[in-house]
Amino acid sequence: MRSEPTPTTPTTVQDDIAVMKAAKDDSAQFALIYERYFQRIYMYCLRQVGNPDEAEDLSSLVFIYAFRGLQKYRGGSVPAWLFRIAYGTVMNYLRSTQHREFAYGDQEPEVAADMQEPLDKIMEAETHARLHELISSLTQEEQQLLSLRIDAGLTSQ
């Protein structure tokens, strides 16, 4: 059963680091990291694989791997650490299923549809097609970087 999106709570790097340190001694504390970052990880995975069920499974795997590797966390940006795990998880999945192209625009995330005016629909479709064209012209590495920036909200740092 798919989890409903939860709003991410604004945090500081220090807040996240404190929670991660506490989680090393009390694993129940890791639930806060899960709550803060699951939706962002899910959206990243969804963008990469294009399938909500697969994205949910991959997102869960990311947090399983993160939980198992909790003792290896050495500080620094928690989202960067999680998205490094997510990147590896998604790449392993894509290699194992022999997917070679990223799912930009191939399948849109499931979103409730609002009624739109026909002209708005046409303009949106044209914009979507142009964005897909531009993104497709990027290398796979550039697509990954763009996805990490948009989906994960990570900065170049």
Image (cartoon, rainbow, N blue to C red):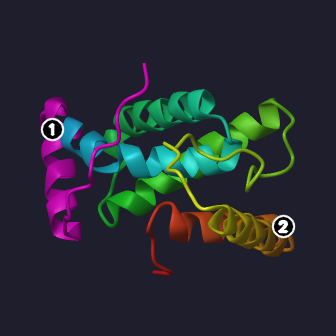
On the question of residue 127 being in view, the answer is: yes
Q: Is residue 61 above or below residue 21?
A: above
Residue receiving disc 2: 136
Position of 140 with respect to 61 (left or right) is right
Q: Specify the segment rendered in magenta.
A: 1-30
Give the residue at x 15% y 30%: 28
Q: CA distance from mark 1 to mark 2?
A: 40 Å
Decide if residue 117 is on the left or right side of residue 112: right
Q: Is residue 85 visible?
A: no
Q: Nearer the viewer, mark 1 or mark 2?
A: 2
Residue at 41% x, 36% y is 63
Q: Which residue is mark 1?
A: 29
Residue at image coords 26%, 42%? 35
15 part of magenta stretch: yes
Pointer 1 local density, CA inside 10 Å: few below 14, some 14–19, many at least 20 = some
- From this viewpoint, which residue is outermost toward the top? 1
Residue 59 image offset from top left, x and y in percent: 49, 37
- Between 72 and 80, the one nearer to me in the picture: 80
